[in-house]
Amino acid sequence: MSGSVGGQTPRGAGRHVVLVGMMGVGKSTVGRRVAQELGRPFSDSDAVIEERTGRTVAQIFAHEGEPAFRTLETEVLAEVLDDPTPTVVAAAGGVVLDPANRTALARAGTVVWLQAPLELLVERVAGSTHRPALEDDPAGTLARLAEGREGLYAEVSDLLVDAARPLDEVVDLIVTTVREREASSAAGGPTS
């Protein structure tokens, strides 16, 4: 399944491309390739947080708790989106939980919701030591997280892409959509 997320008013005055979706969906992998194709810098919000704090996401969750991580997540997202340089951003999976982040994403540019079946997500994150939210039940945890986030991903997204498709197809669809939206915006047309 791929295509526009319906029912939204034109938005996204910015020129960033932000990938949202569940952990394990491939935001970083896809984001790097999209950035390369578009000739833009790439930013992974989790990596920025880890670099800035000198701690892994798991360590932040364990020692400071989820609220501290979410605060850092919001700060990093705001900084990246405030930068005038068009960037491709892999946003942390829970970025949509904060209303301020959803507002920022509405101005970002093109927000892409990467979606994949639960079974694929579980397979991709199995044995991961850097995903603190998974606890002892990855499938159950991912299902609960997805249930609480899917409506929020839909709210902020301009494009829904099936990340279970081959990587080249996913990247091509996103790049084509971004170029079309930006060409339409430059010509004064609607952006969604």
Image: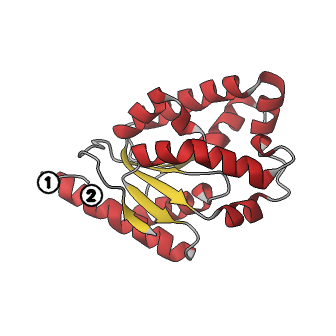
Please state which amino acid type lies under the numbered disc 1. Gly
Residue 91 percent coordinates (x, y): 55, 44
Q: Residue 24 got which mark?
A: none
| 170 or 53: nearer the viewer | 170
Please state which amino acid type lies under the numbered disc 2. Arg
Q: Quadrant of residue 117?
A: bottom right
Sequence-wise first label, 2 or 1 = 2
Residue 150 percent coordinates (x, y): 53, 48
Question: At 69% across and 61% down in the image, what residue appears?
Answer: 121
How far separated are the C-alphas under marks 2 and 1?
Answer: 9 Å
Residue 154 percent coordinates (x, y): 44, 49
Question: At 23% across and 46% down in the image, what residue appears?
Answer: 10
Q: Quadrant of residue 92?
A: top right
Residue 55 percent coordinates (x, y): 78, 33
- Is the C terminus in the top left, top right, bottom left or bottom right quadrant? bottom left
**CB under 8 Å between discs 2 and 1:** no
Question: At 55% across and 62% down in the image, what residue appears?
Answer: 30
Residue 40 versus residue 102 in the image, above or below:
below
Residue 63 versus residue 174 in the image, above or below:
above
Give the residue pinned by disc 1: 189
Question: At 13% across and 55% down in the image, what residue appears?
Answer: 187
Give the residue pinned by disc 2: 181
Crowd around label 1: few <14 · some 14–19 · many ≥20 (10 Å):
few
| 167 or 159: nearer the viewer | 159
Mark 2 lies on a secondary structure that is: helix
